[in-house]
Amino acid sequence: MKIKAYLKPHCGWSNGVRAIMAKHQLAFEDIDIINHRAHYEEMVRKSGQPLSPCVEIDGVMLADISGEEVENYMLANNLVNPSGAPLDVPTNAGCSQEEHERMAAKPVRFF
């Protein structure tokens, strides 16, 4: 399976996608859309919209999706088997207050 995940370095939704990949021991390309404008532009072009995370699995783009939704897609399409592996972060939640504070301390402005 070829997986490209368009993610923010620090984001509850993005961390949920990473947690699902780890849970199922899946290799994936973690593409930083915050610090690399070209990556963000690629995500928008491929997904047709500006929200993240976006995950491309074998050419199928899942736009503005949570880790929980990515896992549901993979289970429904028999790409992974059910797993009871523990998770260290929520898979369907935005940023925590701590994450928001960390991001606010170092704003990135390239648009």
Image (cartoon, helix red, strand yellow):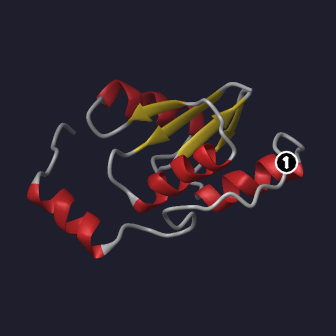
Q: Residue furthest left?
A: 105
- Tell me where residue 109 appears, x and y as whole percent: 15, 43
Q: Residue furthest front?
A: 85
Q: Residue at x 13, y 51 (%)?
A: 107
Give the quarter of the figure containing the N terminus. Answer: top right
Image quadrant assignment for residue 82: bottom right
Q: Residue furthest bottom?
A: 97
Tag 1 secondary structure: loop
Q: Residue at x 43, y 68 (%)?
A: 94
- Tell me where residue 67 appears, x and y as whole percent: 60, 56
- At label 1, counting other C-alpha atoms closer than 10 Å, the crowd grade (few under 14, some 14-19, many 20 or more) is few
The amino acid sitting under disc 1 is: Asn
Give the quarter of the figure containing the C terminus. Answer: top left
Q: Is residue 19 left or right of residue 14?
A: right
Look at the picture and state if 36 lies above or below 15. Answer: above
Q: Residue at x 60, y 55 (%)?
A: 65
Front-lying residue, 38 or 28: 28
Look at the picture and state if 78 lies above or below 27. Answer: below
Front-lying residue, 43 or 80: 80
- Tell me where residue 20 appears, x and y as whole percent: 62, 51
Q: Residue at x 49, y 64 (%)?
A: 89
Q: Is residue 29 left or right of residue 26?
A: left
Q: Is residue 53 left or right of residue 101?
A: right
Residue designated by label 1: 81
